[in-house]
Amino acid sequence: MAKNSESIDKGGVAEEALREYFKGLGSFVLRGVPVKEGSEAVTDIDLWVYTRSSPLSRHVTIVDIKNKKRGKAFERAIWLKGLQAAVGADDAVVATQGARDSAFKFASRLQIKVLSSGVFDAIVKRYSTEGQRLSLEDIEGQWRKVTLGPSNVATLMETARLEVSKGIDFATLNHWVDDAVRLLKEARDRERPMIGPITRAFYYCCALVAIAADYLGREHVLSDHDARKKHFRSGMIFGQNDDAAAKRYLDFAESVATEFLDQSGAAAAQIRSGFERAASE
């Protein structure tokens, strides 16, 4: 868990401990993923757990954590089932100190897993006193002090995490790549040596990029290099991995250029060759 936990409350301690637990099982874990609809803040996901259980399998689990004796497991199970549907997670887990035997049966009907009180307490005890990583509270405290345009790094990173709750697609991947590039430039210009909060944010975005690439490429893990490259090039340029998308866009651009700019077709040909050259680069 975090080496400096002075700024963490009881709930945060449990979240950090469970993050370490799932990370130890080989999963990639995010804390505090916000969920919004338009400009309205809906809730947040305590833990978002991404697991690559095999070369052909990817699994997303959301975990709701309440470090209280009266954790209201029944209410949390109903609420979490709706959140699971909203964010498209494969699985959902309620982790609370207050789980009774009847809560397990009720959650099972909802296809929600409940972490028993004994296991919950053991995980918190085992993982709340070890580790060297900064807690989310500590690193966000550092990020809030670093200006970035009209806002700060903490705001940028919250927006990056928000994309997770919307579902990972090529638009999300492009978003995180852009964020990583921006943060790398800022870190290079403002941090010497590059070990400060901006550099940490850059590595955070790189991790998100890696997870997105793994998830979006899951159907091509057995394909050859050229097929994977084609898949990602089409997806990152057009927002989808539909090979026909490029042809539709180019055909439309060529028809507009021919009708309104140059009926000889020379402009259309120049558009196509220019696009293909840019795409290959």
Image (cartoon, rainbow, N blue to C red):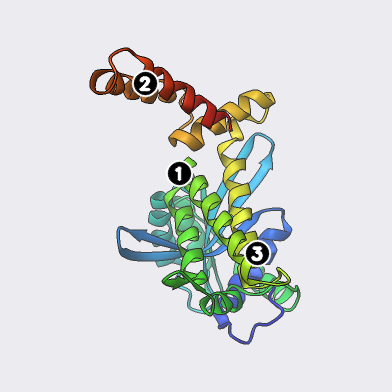
Mark 2 crowdedness (10 Å alpha carbons): few <14, some 14-19, many ≥20? some
Mark 3 crowdedness (10 Å alpha carbons): few <14, some 14-19, many ≥20? few
**What residue is shown with label 3?**
188
Secondary structure beneath dot 2 equals helix
Calculate the distance from the C-alpha at mark 1 to the C-alpha at mark 2.
Answer: 30 Å
Secondary structure beneath dot 1 equals helix
Q: Residue at x 43, y 22 (%)?
A: 270
Q: Residue at x 51, y 64 (%)?
A: 157
Q: Residue at x 50, y 37 (%)?
A: 236
Q: Can residue 45 be seen?
A: no
Q: Residue at x 55, y 38 (%)?
A: 216
Q: Position of residue 80 (x, y in %)?
A: 43, 59
- Image quarter of residue 49: bottom right
Q: Is 255 positioned to the left or the right of 111 in the image?
A: left
- Tag 2 or tag 3, which sits nearer the N-term? 3
Which is in the foreground here, disc 3 or disc 2? 2
Q: Which mark is residue 267?
A: 2
Calculate the distance from the C-alpha at mark 1 to the C-alpha at mark 3.
Answer: 26 Å
